[in-house]
Amino acid sequence: MMLAPVCLQCGKPVGPEPDGLQLAFGRFCSRACARAFRARPVEVTCSVCGKKFLLPGPVTREGPPYFCSGVCLESGAADKTSARRSG
Ligand SMILES: [Zn+2]
Ligand SMILES: [Zn+2]
């Protein structure tokens, strides 16, 4: 049984690419789909209040903490900066 690889973004069968597109972009049918996949909203959990929300944009390189709102952002930032002041 053979599993045909499909585009992770649009679900189209990718198939064996003769020109190495698959190797270059992973399992995507096109460069556009690879970009769209990385840029799509990802559900994360707010590090302050624990609420789940959609984070628009790539989060692969950004780890937690995540903040659902400006209020939580301030709360989290205040918690960080209270440890030590630089400058
Ligand atoms: Zn695609
Ligand atoms: Zn929050």
Image: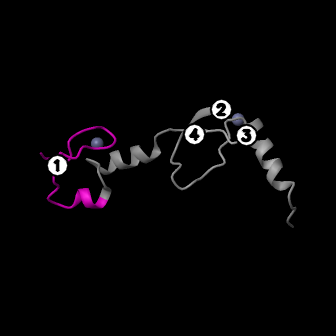
Residue drawn at point x = 80 percent, y = 53 percent: 80
Which circle's residue, 2 or 1, is located before the other in the chain? 1
Q: Is mark 4 within 8 Å of ligand 2?
A: no
Q: CA distance from mark 3 to mark 1?
A: 44 Å
Whole-number angstrom distance, CA of label 4 to CA of label 1: 32 Å
**Magenta stretch secondary structure, dominant:** loop
Q: Mark 2 and ligand 2: say if the CB distance to the nearest ligand atom is below 8 Å.
A: yes
Image depth: mark 2 or mark 1 in front: 2
Report the residue marked by disc 4: 44
Q: Which residues are magenta?
A: 1-24
Drawn side of residue 14 relative to residue 49, left or right: left
Q: Nearer the viewer, residue 49 or 68?
A: 49
Residue depicted at x 29% and y 48% = 28
Residue furthest to the bottom: 87
Mark 2 secondary-structure assignment? loop
The secondary structure type at the circle numbered 1 is loop
Q: What amino acid type should be assigned to the residue bearing mark 2? A: Lys
Q: Identify which amino acid the numbered label 1 is placed on.
A: Gly
Q: Earlier in the sequence, mark 4 or mark 1?
A: 1
Q: Which residue is mark 2?
A: 51
Pointer 1 residue = 15
Q: Is residue 87 above or below residue 36?
A: below
As shown in the figure, which amino acid type bears the numbered disc 3?
A: Val
Res 54 label: none
